Amino acid sequence: MTLQEMIHESRKIVFFGGAGVSTESGIPDFRSEDGLYRQTYAYPPETILSASFFHSHPEEFYRFYRDKMLPLWAKPNAAHRKLAEWEKEGKLLAVVTQNIDGLHQAAGSKNVFELHGSIHRNHCLKCGRSFSAREIAESDGVPKCPCGGTIKPDVVLYGEPLDERTVRGAIGAISSADMLLVAGTSLTVYPAAGFLAYFRGKYLVLINRDETPLDDKCDLVLHETIGEVFSQL
């Protein structure tokens, strides 16, 4: 059975996406040849993007964060737009994403569970006031609230737990889906990759350029880019 036929048959699709969904909007992923983890900084990205590093070296954290984690120029691509279209038609229940760029919402998707948070939400650690990604991008050094508190992005850093409400919503959507479409993720980052175990539906489909540990568990595996696949739908 083809992907098109599976989609046509399904009424409760959930999309689970990783960095590969955003690479076609020009945002580099983490683990590919030219990804963030292959580049050289004073500290490894995993160290910089940790909660302990944020608190101990906030200036160095923000230098990297502004340089590499705030692609405010990026626009939704064909996959983002198609998913928003399916949601509008009532075929798509939800998007569960490991990305923090907000491109699904920019394309029009409403029911989005952002497992790792969002660059578009930032708050003062002292008073809780909210700030936009643009305000963070245009600030200097360690961004401060008028109250004097340090501003922190609402992204899940290494060493921090996932948001419980987001996790419950994502698991609820996946467990009630009749089709789970997994795309652009190596399925090596936990706990996010473990969410697939909650799927009880009919079709498990994987679209990823490289092989993953769950290839043999899927009903259909396409080793292509998301753009190549979605342009044919």
Image (spheres, rainbow, N blue to C red):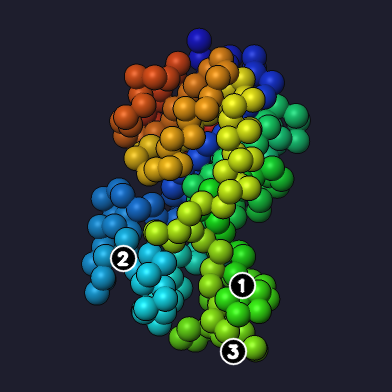
Is 28 located above or below residue 132 in the figure?
Answer: above
Give the structural element (helix, strand or loop) at label 2: helix
Task: Identify residue type, mark 2.
Answer: Thr
Q: Is residue 35 left or right of residue 202?
A: left
Mark 3 or mark 2: whose residue is earlier in sequence: 2
Q: Is residue 4 visible?
A: no
Residue on which the image places disc 3: 148
Q: Is residue 82 left or right of residue 181?
A: right
Cα gap from disc 3 to disc 2, whole angstroms:
26 Å
Q: Position of residue 212 (x, y in %)?
A: 33, 31
Give the structural element (helix, strand or loop) at label 3: loop
Label 2: few (<14), some (14–19) or many (≥20) C-alpha neighbours in 10 Å: some
Q: Residue furthest top?
A: 1
Which residue is found at the position 57% from the left and 43% from the top? 167
Q: Position of residue 151 (x, y in %)?
A: 56, 77
- Numbered circle sitting on residue 47: 2
- Numbered circle sitting on residue 123: 1
